Amino acid sequence: NAGVTQTPKFRVLKTGQSMTLLCAQDMNHEYMYWYRQDPGMGLRLIHYSVGEGTTAKGEVPDGYNVSRLKKQNFLLGLESAAPSQTSVYFCASNWASGGALTYEQYFGPGTRLTVT
Amino acid sequence: GENVEQHPSTLSVQEGDSAVIKCTYSDSASNYFPWYKQELGKRPQLIIDIRSNVGEKKDQRIAVTLNKTAKHFSLHITETQPEDSAVYFCAASYPGLGGGSQGNLIFGKGTKLSVKP
């Protein structure tokens, strides 16, 4: 049981390049989230999904797109990276339908992205 | 708008002393208040949480109190140890933001706790 995993762990991009971050969970969770963490800013929600095939915007969605084609995977895309997107990105998941009622979000290990 | 204020931003205590971190939230509909601990370079991990129908919850050296009227909640760590050194984040659920019945979380900006041996 790996929990929540993220790929890649580190990445350096040049301005204007694109990339996709992958989040995978093996806990049968319905909900998945993408956050960014910047120094002194806490965690801010980018996009989230309440089930396979559904996505919605969070606090800071501009410049990002997401997809949830499979229940266990949640992809975060940057179409044209900007230096302002330099950050640590965390994926999280929760809410296993049919299981014990819990709101706890389980976080992945993070992806450190630098855009030059 | 939706907001969670967290204080202090840094806290330094001697080993064995108590530490208290305070948060306030803005939406009276918030019903879930977790606290996360994040060690350097690691992922945030839940240490304790409280629902709006409970005023206090304890787990060994850690306790959380909730005052719904004042819209604030606090984390109390007693008998602090060097391994308690980390950044602590509070969060509050905001049902109006979507994300299911409990709503999505808004996080505070974090408190860096240093416990000196």
Image: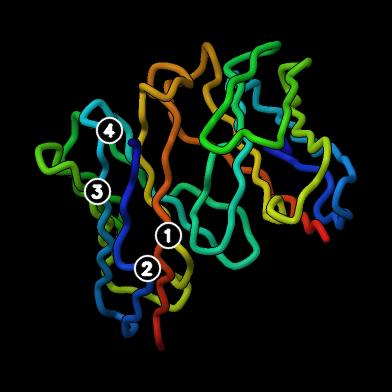
The quadrant in which residue B42 appears is: bottom right
Disc 2/disc 1 C-alpha distance (Å): 6 Å
Same chain shared by disc 3 and disc 4: yes
Marked residue nearer the N-terminal end (2 or 3): 2
Q: Please, which chain is the residue tagged with disc 1 on?
A: B
**Which residue is denoted by mark 4 in the rendering?**
B51
Quick one: B25 or A80, which is closer to the camera? A80
Which amino acid does the dot numbered 3 rest on? Thr
Residue A103 placement (x, y as % from top left): 44, 29
Residue A23, relative to residue B102: is it above or below? Answer: below
Mark 2 / mark 4, whichever is N-terminal: 2
Q: Count the marks: how many?
A: 4
User: Which of A92/B5 is in front?
Assistant: B5
Disc 2/disc 4 C-alpha distance (Å):
24 Å
Left or right, A39 with respect to B88, comes to right
**Classed neighbour count for the residue bearing mark 4: other residues with Cα under 10 Å, few (<14), some (14–19), many (≥20):** some
Chain of the residue under the numbered disc 3 shown in the image:
B
Are there few (<14), some (14-19), or many (20+) residues within 10 Å of tag 3?
A: many
- Provide the residue designation for mark 1: B110
Residue position marked by numbered label 2 in the rendering: B9
Both labels 2 and 3 in a single chain: yes
Percent x, y for residue B23? 27, 52
Q: Secondary structure at mark 4?
A: strand
Badge 2 density bin: few <14, some 14–19, many ≥20, Cα 10 Å: some
2 vs 4, front mark: 2
Q: Residue at x 78, y 59 (%)?
A: A114
Marks 1 and 4, Cα distance to the nearest angstrom? 20 Å
Give whichever of discs 3 and 4 has the lower sequence position: 3
Closer to the chain start, of discs 1 and 3, is 3
